[in-house]
Amino acid sequence: MIIAVDGPAGSGKSTISKLLAKELGLVYLDTGAMYRLFTLKMLKENVSFSDNDKINELLEKLNINIENDKFYLDDEDVSKEIRKTDVAENVSKTAAIDEVREKMVSLQREFSKSKNVILDGRDIGTVVFPEADIKIFLVADPRERAERRFKELKAKGENISLDSIYENILKRDKLDSTRENSPLKKANDAIEVDTTGKNIEEVKNIILNLYNNKG
Ligand code: CDP
């Protein structure tokens, strides 16, 4: 069983995917976190986005691990760091690099082998698993998405303005949906769910209904 959840930043993908994973006994993979981990590595190593040789070298030696809610880079828990502004500001540039996508997609397929999984990202239903059993495309009004992210980061003690989050979300939406390699877009057979004004419970129930009707 493979459930693909795609959609723009802050549309509620990870919240819903975690809940569904619990409810349906699936393993959850946050693919965005993988791009964030690699972005953090590039920032730590001061690598330029045009330095292909160095990028390939980092990809070859990449040491990332995901255990439930914890994300490790070179055996260090960087779960908090990958959500910070400098990573958010650069992740869409990293995610547009062909070699980076190739590596991440291959790790995602490997991870999902012989498991029942729910993955969230931008290209899960279109590229990573075009044969997924269920494909959901979550959307929501950008203002509401920014407000959700603002609350999330505030609760974690990040000091960042709502306006800058809104700008970052719009910028990432644009970069993610206009890039050449695996752009963010709804797969033809994905079901679009607009989460604007809906609470988590409502969205979860919509998706559970789809799941139950699939048999
Ligand atoms: O949680 P949020 O919606 O802010 O983003 P994320 O899922 O953590 O993804 C961060 C970034 O990684 C996105 O803006 C994309 O640039 C990239 N990404 C991607 O290209 N493909 C994926 N399957 C997942 C994320």
Image: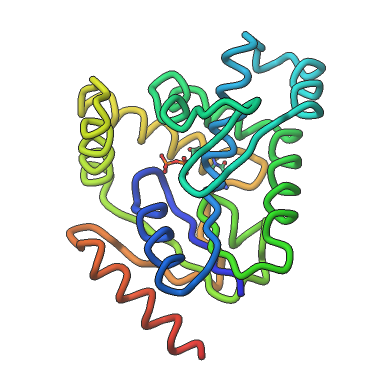
Residue at point 53%, 68% (across, down): 26
Near-viewer residue (157 or 36): 157
Near-viewer residue (105 or 189): 105
Query: Horizontal placement of 135 versus 45: left or right?
Result: left
Q: How is the image coloured?
A: rainbow
Above/below status of 95 relative to 108: above
Residue at point 55%, 53% (across, down): 29
Q: Residue furthest top?
A: 46
Q: Position of residue 18 (x, y in %)?
A: 41, 58
Query: Horizontal placement of 77 versus 162: left or right?
Result: right
Q: Position of residue 84 (x, y in %)?
A: 39, 24
Locate residue 54: give its quadrant.
top right
Residue at point 66%, 67% (across, down): 115
Q: Residue furthest left?
A: 197
Query: Horizontal placement of 29 versus 62: left or right?
Result: left
Locate residue 128: give its quadrant.
bottom right
Residue at point 52%, 54% (across, down): 185
Q: Position of residue 74 (x, y in %)?
A: 65, 25
* Total labels drawn: 0
Q: Position of residue 182 (x, y in %)?
A: 64, 47
Query: Horizontal placement of 23 versus 57: left or right?
Result: left
Locate residue 63: give its quadrant.
top right
Near-viewer residue (66 or 168): 66
Above/below status of 30 relative to 208: above
Above/below status of 124 relative to 39: below
Q: Quick one: quadrant of the N terminus? A: bottom right
